[in-house]
Amino acid sequence: MSLVYCKSCSGILSREDARCPHCGALSPKRRSFRLTGILLSMAMVILIAGIALSGLTPAFELAATPLLSEQQRSQQEKLLVSELKNIPAKEIYTNMHMYKVLMDLFPSNQRYIKKHTHYAIKVKELEQKIGERPVVNDLDGIPSAIKVFVKKRVKNRRSVDFKSCSKMSFSDAGWIISCKYSGGNLVDADVLKDYQFTLRHNSVVTTTKLF
């Protein structure tokens, strides 16, 4: 199972993930593979129908063949283990995801199972306290809750133009992200504003003006 980097936050994710486990953005690989998946599904249906008519034994009734060879799995393992050495233990989402990939590669490996379970528990405890990672817009990577929060507090909602947001982090206080935007009021429509937002359970709880 190969890994890719998220274009929104640069986090590591599996090629098979529909969304980035770090920022929630739609996987770029997933977008490009949708049409391919549909075509492959159609081809498989046609193939199975052809096999059924010919009277041959379908491939899925034969002994299963691993998608990856032992050598390929070993190479993937070395890559993942090398990546894990550079990931701090506090990065619980990344660690959980990486060990999930290792666990999928080696389902009977007790160390990978225990590590994944450990980080999965940490993630669950965190999300019970501050909520799941805030939902971000697939197009611009801006959390929806921040857009709603800002536009409710300005005179001219349509003029609000979000420029960018930092990579999201978390603490006991909540999910933390800094965003730059302009507009909102006639007097300072062109002034770039930079705020740090803290969110809990997908709602903004505090803001800090950075400049």
Image (cartoon, rainbow, N blue to C red):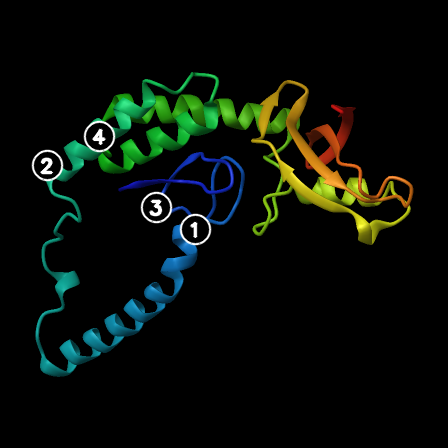
The quadrant of the rendering that contains the C terminus is top right
Number of other residues with Cα within 10 Å of mark 2, as a class: few under 14, some 14 to 19, many 20 or more: few
How far is disc 3 from disc 2 in space, using C-alphas? Answer: 19 Å
Q: Which residue is mark 1?
A: 28
In the foreground, 138 or 155: 155
Q: Which residue is mark 2?
A: 71
Q: Earlier in the sequence, mark 4 or mark 2?
A: 2
- Helix, strand or loop status at disc 3: loop
Q: Earlier in the sequence, mark 1 or mark 3?
A: 3
How far is disc 1 from disc 3 in space, using C-alphas? Answer: 9 Å
In the foreground, 15 or 42: 15
Residue extending furthest toward the bottom: 53
Residue at (35, 48) in percent of width and height: 16
Q: Which residue is mark 4?
A: 77
How far is disc 4 from disc 2 in space, using C-alphas? Answer: 10 Å
- Helix, strand or loop status at disc 4: helix
How far is disc 2 from disc 1 in space, using C-alphas? Answer: 28 Å
Residue 15 disc label:
3
Number of other residues with Cα within 10 Å of mark 1, as a class: few under 14, some 14 to 19, many 20 or more: some
Whether residues under marks 4 and 3 lie with C-beta atoms below 8 angstroms apart, the answer is no
Q: Horizontally, is 99 left or right of 64 in the view?
A: right
- Helix, strand or loop status at disc 1: helix
Q: Earlier in the sequence, mark 2 or mark 1?
A: 1
How far is disc 1 from disc 4 in space, using C-alphas? Answer: 24 Å
Q: Amino acid at mark 3?
A: Arg
Q: Earlier in the sequence, mark 1 or mark 4?
A: 1
Q: Amino acid at mark 1?
A: Pro
Q: Position of residue 2 (x, y in %)?
A: 28, 41
In the foreground, 22 or 151: 151
Number of other residues with Cα within 10 Å of mark 3, as a class: few under 14, some 14 to 19, many 20 or more: some
